[in-house]
Image: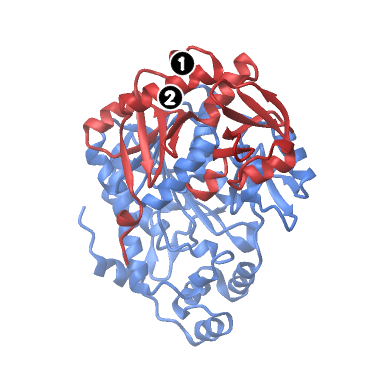
């Protein structure tokens, strides 16, 4: 599939209005970013979004239920001064609502013993729960490092008694952390691969019933923990990211078995990185459809069908969106794509 | 600025026979159990910089290797090769000791464990109980929950249990 960067750039280019400039100036954003918020949400909700980005998010502790119960973990961390609150839709996971000055979550003895994984935010639990709903078998996690989702998948598959996680990433120093987490959490059903995910479809002889693609993205949904992202990505950089996201998705759908499901995930609220990418690929590959999430774990927002000058297939409305100002989580988008039989 | 590949030295492959035999010998000497029950025939070695781990092979991975896919880790963590010493992994030690009871081990107080997990040695006064070792190498056990947290070697000249490796490697080496 030939993808022209210039075409993408033309499609996603926006000319900021005076209003966008004023808001951007006040909050330290690039004007084109704010213009997109105004186009998607209107002025009132855009300001709510920007203010939500200023608020801290609650980190999450996910119990490694293969070696400790969530009850016991909560007790032990409470004794150290952490106050945990159960996440109703993610059994065994807790929001950390209060923490002591010392130790940090990543340095307790319990952490080193592999009793839990620390997620920056609860949003990353969601794609795993949706993708693995009613499923047992092998899973490919195409951009897996540092390993929050891969270790979660491995843990769930192990509990269900069968399945290997193929955890791939291109960045070696991030894979090193993933290997550390696998060893620390005593997981034995993970194969760690070092490859460009775009090359996997040519290398693998087998196909998968489940694939997770957490694509490297602008991270526009994580501004609350990385404020530098307010002004880091120019529109051209953005177009380059979108091009890579299309290439990744287009190549990985080739690795799906018929009726297999791929979760396309980004920690971004940008329609250009989500609905635009999915729309591009479903149009190019006619054997793929967007499906509804199998579970309603949260009151998700739906995918965006029209944005700026772009109109996408109605199917992309089935994607789900998490908004910082609506859900109190990172901005996050998940689209489940199914290969037709 | 050096590239990422230059900064991180990665080596993967089949575990050399010499290291595999050293691992089996360490298991036998430490715990008096049949190492073949715990160490499968096919194992792999992954070295990241100077830290090497021995792990089991997952059969599905063989086909991937034939396709020239670079596999950097797979299966169960069996052992480490650090400071020119081969020892079982904490996960494997945990498995063996759960089946056979504590041996070649020291039960260490909370304060001693805290220092040990920062890479420090263990002072004799932090040791609550000693389970004899014929080799001088001891599995270090956290007395609060009986979990394996690393390995040490008794040094009579310095009068300390010298840290060989501990679970703090996950922060200090593997990030």
**Image quarter of residue A310:** bottom left
Relative horizontal placement of residue B175, taking residue A204 as reference (left or right) = right
Q: Secondary structure at mark 2?
A: helix
Identify the chain of the residue marked 1, using the numbered disc in the image: B
Q: Is residue A258 visible?
A: no
Which residue bears the numbered disc 1?
A: B35
Relative horizontal placement of residue A62, taking residue A249 as reference (left or right) = right
Query: Tag 1: Cα neighbours inside 10 Å, few (<14), some, or many (≥20)?
Result: some
Residue B66: image location, x then y, percent:
22, 30
Identify the chain of the residue marked 2, using the numbered disc in the image: B
Are the two marked residues, 2 and 1, in contact with CB atoms closer than 8 angstroms? yes
Which residue bears the numbered disc 2?
A: B23
Chain B: its colour in the image is red
Residue name at image x 75 percent, y 55 percent? A100
Relative horizontal placement of residue B111, taking residue A340 as reference (left or right) = right
Looking at the image, residue A333 lies above or below residue A228:
above
Residue B151: image location, x then y, percent:
56, 33
Residue at the front extreme, as displayed: B157
Mark sitting earlier along the chain (2/1) = 2
**Chain (blue):** A
Looking at the image, residue A186 lies above or below residue A331:
above
**Image quarter of residue A102:** bottom right
Label 2 to label 1: alpha-carbon separation: 8 Å
Residue name at image x 74 percent, y 46 percent? A85
Residue name at image x 44 percent, y 20 percent? B25
Which numbered marker is on residue B121?
none
Looking at the image, residue A91 lies above or below residue A318:
above
């Amino acid at each position: 599939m030939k993808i022209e960067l210039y075409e993408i750039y033309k499609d996603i280019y926006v000319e900021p209005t005076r209003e966008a400039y004023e808001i951007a100036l006040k909050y330290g954003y690039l004007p084109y970013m704010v213009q997109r918020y105004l186009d998607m949400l209107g002025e009132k909700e855009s300001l709510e979004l920007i203010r939500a980005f200023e608020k801290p998010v609650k980190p999450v502790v996910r119990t490694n239920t293969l070696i400790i119960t969530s009850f016991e973990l909560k007790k032990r961390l409470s004794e150290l001064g952490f106050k945990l609150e159960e996440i109703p839709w993610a059994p065994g996971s807790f929001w950390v609502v209060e923490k002591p000055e010392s130790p940090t979550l990543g340095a307790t003895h319990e952490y080193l013993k592999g009793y839990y994984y620390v997620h920056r935010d609860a949003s990353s639990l969601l794609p795993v729960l949706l993708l693995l709903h009613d499923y047992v078998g092998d899973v490919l996690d195409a951009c897996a490092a540092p390993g929050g989702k891969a270790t979660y998948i491995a843990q769930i598959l192990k509990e269900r008694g069968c399945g290997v996680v193929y955890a791939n990433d291109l960045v070696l120093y991030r894979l090193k952390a993933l290997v550390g987490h696998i060893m620390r959490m005593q997981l034995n059903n993970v194969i760690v691969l070092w490859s460009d995910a775009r090359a996997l479809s040519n290398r693998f002889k087998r196909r998968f019933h489940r694939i997770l693609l957490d694509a490297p993205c602008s991270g526009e949904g994580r501004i609350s923990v990385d404020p530098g992202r307010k002004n880091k990505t120019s529109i051209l950089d953005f177009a380059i990211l979108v091009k890579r996201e299309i290439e990744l998705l287009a190549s990985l759908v080739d690795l799906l078995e018929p009726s297999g499901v791929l979760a396309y995930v980004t920690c971004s609220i940008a329609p250009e990185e989500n609905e635009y990418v999915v729309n591009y690929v479903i149009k190019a590959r006619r054997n793929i459809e967007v499906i509804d999430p199998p579970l309603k774990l949260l009151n998700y927002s739906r995918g965006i069908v029209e944005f700026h000058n772009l109109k996408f297939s109605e199917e992309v409305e089935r994607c789900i969106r998490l908004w910082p100002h609506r859900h109190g989580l990172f901005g996050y988008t998940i689209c489940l794509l199914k290969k037709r039989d | 600025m050096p590239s990422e590949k230059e900064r991180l030295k990665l080596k993967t492959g089949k575990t050399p026979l010499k290291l595999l035999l050293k691992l089996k010998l360490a298991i036998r000497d430490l715990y008096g159990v049949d190492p073949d029950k715990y160490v499968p025939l096919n194992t792999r070695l992954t070295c990241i910089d100077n830290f090497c781990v021995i792990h089991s092979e997952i059969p599905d991975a063989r086909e991937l290797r034939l396709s020239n896919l670079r596999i950097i880790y797979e299966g169960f963590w069996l052992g480490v090769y650090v400071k020119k010493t081969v020892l079982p992994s904490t996960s494997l030690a945990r498995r063996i000791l759960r089946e056979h009871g504590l041996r070649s081990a020291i039960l260490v107080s909370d304060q001693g464990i805290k220092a040990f997990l920062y890479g420090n040695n263990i002072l004799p006064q932090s040791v609550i109980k000693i389970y004899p070792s014929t080799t001088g190498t001891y599995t270090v056990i956290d007395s609060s929950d009986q979990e394996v947290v690393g390995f040490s070697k008794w040094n009579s000249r310095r009068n300390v249990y010298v840290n060989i490796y501990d679970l703090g490697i996950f922060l200090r080496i593997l990030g």
